[in-house]
Amino acid sequence: MTLTPRVSSAAVATSAAAALLLLTACSGAPPQDDAPADERLDVVTAAYPLQYVTERIAGDDATATSALSAGTDVHEAELAPSQALRLSRADLVVALPGLQAGVDAALSDAAPERVVDVTEAAALDGDDLHFWLDPLRLADVGDEVAGALAAADPDRADGYRQRAAQLRTDLTALDQRYADGLAPCRGASLVTSHEAFGYLADRYGLQQLGVAGLDPEVEPTPARLRAVVEQVQDTGVRTLYFETEATDAVTRALASRLGTATGVLDPMESAREPGADLVATADANLRALTDGLVCS
């Protein structure tokens, strides 16, 4: 597989660290961390939604961990040398190229034995990578991960497939809750601090408008701010949403100027502790949407 990571200082640092560690390993120096104590697959994932899916499908038959430490900003992630080495030694890596430049660079240098790129299964639309905000796309990725686990560990294939089927059931139920809850809101304007919610908006008939674009680190232009103000005034938007993982200063200032309420949505980008419940977070997002959107 060919990866095309975005160039950044984090990527350069990670690439150098990975190369140094691999050269050290090849020279015969003793490894700095112990190999897994059991025979289970060691799976490393490159984003929290992929971690959640892999944990659910792996169950007790494989270990699933994130390449990043909990709380790491997905857009500026820089792998420590120990993280790059762990990535290189994994039995399987579940990746979404383009989301994290540091992880992409480490994968390109380290060339793990097996890498599953979920891009095709997620059916990405343009440059927006936040596919997991559409539950059914995430279920499709779960099937892809189950297939990769089964191929790498045939003796436990039935368990992987059964747990993937249960995950699909849970995500289909989540999708139905969203469809029911947002049915009265179809056509409503969803104004967010950055455009991370396009897949959600498309699936449930909302009109997303971000104060910033896809990259939350890029300051909005005056023209973009004027467009947001006009949209709010023309459509009677009651709530401007900022995010748990992005600065909210501009969005709060706009809300104060326009006299609207503010709400919080979680784009579920940053790394989480093992076992964090994506479905519960998605349900909290649904409550915030039904509370704040203009619905009939």
Image (tube, rainbow, N blue to C red):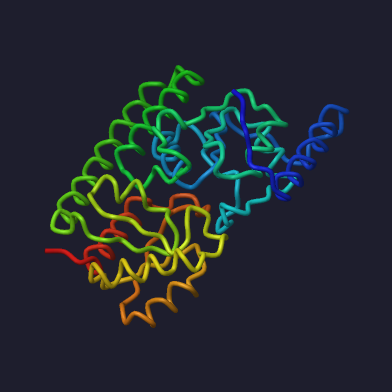
The reply, left or right, for residue 184 in relation to residue 151 is: left
Residue 271 coordinates in the image, percent (x, y): 53, 52
**The one of 294 and 19 positioned closer to us in this rendering:** 294
Residue that appears at 33% across and 56% down = 208
Residue that appears at 47% across and 24% down = 148
**The one of 164 and 133 positioned closer to us in this rendering:** 133
Viewport quadrant of the N terminus: top right
Q: Quadrant of residue 185?
A: bottom left
Residue that extends furthest to the left in the rendered view of this protein: 296
Residue 190 coordinates in the image, percent (x, y): 30, 61
Residue that appears at 35% across and 74% down = 262
**The one of 114 and 15 positioned closer to us in this rendering:** 15
Residue 121 coordinates in the image, percent (x, y): 40, 29
Q: Is residue 223 above or below residue 90?
A: below
Residue 230 coordinates in the image, percent (x, y): 33, 69
Viewport quadrant of the C terminus: bottom left
Q: Quadrant of residue 292?
A: bottom left
The reply, left or right, for residue 222 in relation to residue 34 is: left
